[in-house]
Image (spheres, helix red, strand yellow):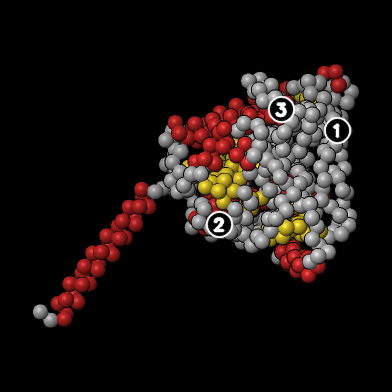
Amino acid sequence: MNKTYYLTVFLLVLGVSCSKKEASNQQAEEIQPKPNVLVIYTDDLGYGDVAKYGGQIPTPHIDQLAEDGMLFTNAYATAATCTPSRYAMLTGEYAWRAKGRGVAPGDASALIRPGRETLPAVMQRAGYRTGVIGKWHLGLGGDEGPDWNGELKPGPLEIGFDYSFIIPATGDRVPTVFVEDHHVVGLDPSDPIEVSYRKKVGDRPTGKEHPELLKMMWSHGHNHTIVNGVSRIGYMAGGESALWRDEDFAQTFVDRASQFITQESDEPFFLYFATHDIHVPRIANEKFQGTTGFGPRGDVIAQLDWTVGELVKLLKGKGLEENTMIIFSSDNGPVLDDGYEDQARELIGSHKPWGALRGGKYSAFEAGTRVPFIVKWPASIKGGKISNAMVSQVDLVGSFAEFLGQEYNAEQAVDTQNAWSALIGEDSVGREGLVQEALFSNLTYIRRDGHKLIPANNGPDMVPWGPIIETGFSSVDQLFNITDDPGETKDLAAEFPELVKEMKSTLQSIKEK
């Protein structure tokens, strides 16, 4: 037999082998469908508030997420307040790049407009059905603001979500109603809603005028219209049939999540589940009240943990747990007194919501933005892992786009990066650096090597209203090594002036990007 014969046989065998390999790869893709994605985004939960991160309040269900998945020790929200963090996570753009993206009032117009690149839009293009349930706080309506008695658009449905069931802003701001898709839930047209953040409207009593009507006393700022025995920020009239009861938040959101997740569909789901816990006013359901010994703040942490447990139980019951990726995190760090006298400080005991860090919500120090971050995906992530990779919530847009093979508008989502390998534990290092936003849009820059720059500014040393939190602001540049000194106790700026200069230059180049 000649060489031609043997070459022909070899090529035939090689072709069969390649065909089998291609078929095997195709079969593997069919066996491993795209995962469902559940982002559980909590509010004001500190780095040390979860038992698995050293907290003293039991959080067994959240701890179990870490046992079954991966716990991150070096993960960040992009800001020390809620609206900017939410904006950045959903758009892939730091919120400080444009004015008007600080903490939004309850009657703000939509901060994310149609045509803007977003995480839910990326998921939609990848074949997911998308939903948002819980706290929104990113504004609704056009330039004239929300029409509470008509169609509330643009809103979540115009930026990539198929379904929306939200509270418009926060529990401590009016209007105190739920919004489903484009309309207030349960609104009686004969009793229209009126909202003002400038003057009193209607005849509902206020916390300032009638403190005797309150079941939780305000401490600062939250002394306007009373709803459900709690005075809020802002004034509201009408909408009596649509008013919420704070004690029912957790169950209401879990019920809506159950309906969305169990909806019959051939598509995987993406659900952005934004809890109200543990934001003020901290009013847990009656079954959690008084259960922790840490007062209302501890009780809503227990309620949050229950919520996580209910969602996981639902996934298990429907056979969805194995191929559902759960990302659990918080929008910023902890705060004790944030507007109501709920004894959070008096009953804190040995619990340290900030862990070994310094500062808290509003602060440029670490506790303002370093947050719990847990990823569970049984189909691809081995349980019980701990990652020290530096990750930021702003990278969810770029990461899911890469994983799902989707292009995205990088000119809009200018700050997002592909961190998929870090999210699933294949990259133990993570980002080169990241920018963090504190109160009054003051920025810090943190490098992967642990060096952190807080540039000089003229801001106050302490938060200029009720919370007793150090801002980290100073009239001189500050430099810390948070790897060696997580409590930011030793300022190294005078010792390493060239490093300060280098990091200031890097921060400036990012700002000019």
Label 1 or label 2, whichever lies nearer to me, is: 2
Q: Residue at x 28, y 64 (%)?
A: 18
Label whose residue precedes the other's in the sequence (3 or 2) = 3
Q: Label 1 belongs to which residue?
A: 220
- Name the residue nearer the viewer: 338 or 355: 355
Q: Quadrant of the C terminus?
A: bottom right
Rendering coords of residue 495 (x, y %): 81, 65
Q: Label 2 belongs to which residue?
A: 428
Kind of residue at disc 1: His
Label whose residue precedes the other's in the sequence (1 or 2) = 1
Quadrant assignment, res 352:
top right
- Name the residue nearer the viewer: 492 or 504: 492
Q: Secondary structure under badge 1?
A: loop
413 vs 41: above or below? below
Q: Secondary structure under badge 2?
A: loop
Kind of residue at disc 3: Phe
Badge 2 crowding class, 10 Å Cα cut-off, few under 14, some 14 to 19, many 20 or more, is: some
Q: CA distance from mark 1 to mark 2?
A: 43 Å
Label whose residue precedes the other's in the sequence (3 or 1) = 1
Q: Residue at x 14, y 77 (%)?
A: 5
User: How many dots with numbers?
Assistant: 3
Q: Are marks 3 and 2 in contact (CB under 8 Å)?
A: no
Q: Residue at x 49, y 58 (%)?
A: 405
